[in-house]
Image: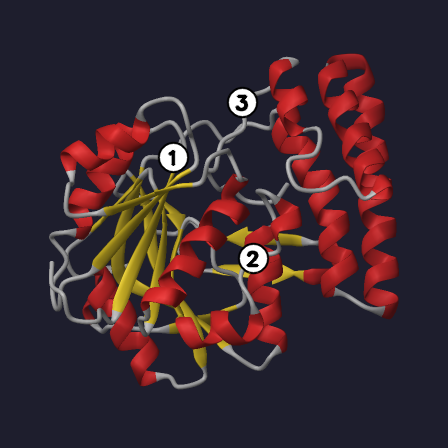
Amino acid sequence: MTDAMPDVIAIVLNYRRPDQTIRCVASLKKSMGDPIRILVVDNSPGDGSGAKIRNAHPDVEVHQSGRNEGYTGGMNSGMNRALAIGAEYFLLLNSDTEVEPEFVQKLVRALRSRPRAAAATGTIRYAGVTDRAWYAGGSQQTWRASAFTAHRYPGEKDIADGVVRSVTFISGCAFLVRSVVVRKLGPFDNRFFMYVEDAEFFSRLLSAGHELLYVPGAMIDHHAGDDSLTPTRLYYSVRNRLLFLEVSTRGATRVCGRAYLALTTLFKICWWSVSDTGHVRAAWAGFRDYLDGNFYAGAGPDLGRGGGTAIRTGHGETT
């Protein structure tokens, strides 16, 4: 580490996974190039995570939020702290990731070569899997309030040639963003809490005329958990996709999107009424909380205790 003002501040969000966070930080310390200042945001007060991370990495700043603020609140807290410190770039990472030594350097190089680009990401691999990627480029279908990622593992030629591609969606799991863009356009919308917030954030950047980049040769491992659709995940998907349509679309696009989402969700509710009543309750709760303006954590924790998964800060594709 160094006392000089860093070009990159890495923000790692921890939620009750200190061992994963410790491994993530250790991988960041092996990054090539100038030293990276690392900031851990601990979203899990009272479980001892902060102390465990400090003991493993005493040179790393650990900011404790005092309560679980979700992905949006935790990352925004970290970005606000990073803005006060000062850096050219922010690297946002889920704690269940481990970066390769050249990961950050390649993303910085890509952004410096494309002045219009606001953010960049690399190939997010399933840890231990070599033939299928968790993220290898992404696109957004705004009218469906959905984002889709490619899973084709990049070929050796893509990696060797240093290919950089424009994309319309980057996952919040891992990306580098210019601090000036965050200062100008704002951080995540805290109302989302988690899920779909990355789609809204990057839609905002695209609307402002910026470019998003995918750098195939910048590699990171993601220890992805179970991506099955739980009541909690479904709740946030329904509520937040409606919120996305409200804040990111206009006119016919918004009307078509709302109609599509309502019809497809109602169809699924009919199916779930026979097979899974927990999903039915979650979907209706998402609709109700959107209409009532009940955002942030909303009904998510209650759904988690009612048979879904507990609140967590991981990322998956929108459903």
Q: Quadrant of residue 48?
A: top left
| Mark 3 secondary-structure assignment | loop
Q: Nearer the viewer, residue 157 or 84?
A: 84
- Reply above or below: 62 against 213: above
How crowded is the residue under tag 2: few (<14 C-alpha within 10 Å), some, or many (20+)? many
Colour theme: secondary structure
Label 2 to label 1: alpha-carbon separation: 22 Å
Q: Which callout, 3 or 1, points at the residue further toward the start of the chain?
A: 1
Q: Which residue does the image show at 51% across and 34% down from the upper left?
A: 68
Residue type at mark 3 is Ala
- Residue at which label 2 appears: 188
Residue occupying the point 71% across, 55% down? 244
Nearer to the camera, 291 or 146: 291
- Crowding at dot 1, Cα within 10 Å, few <14 / some 14-19 / many 20+, comes out as some
Mark 2 vs mark 1: give the one in front: 2
Determine the CA span between mark 3 and mark 1: 16 Å
Judging by the rendered image, the residue that carries numbered circle 3 is: 310
Q: Is residue 150 visible?
A: no
Provide the residue designation for mark 1: 224
| Amino acid type, label 1 | Ala
Up the image or down, 242 lies above or below 142; here it is above
On the image, the x and y values in percent for residue 172 come to 46, 52
Compared across the picture, whether 12 is left or right of 232 comes to: left
Q: Residue at x 41, y 53 (%)?
A: 78
Image coordinates for residue 168, horizontal then vertical, percent:
54, 67
State the separation of the CA atoms marked 3 and 2.
Answer: 22 Å
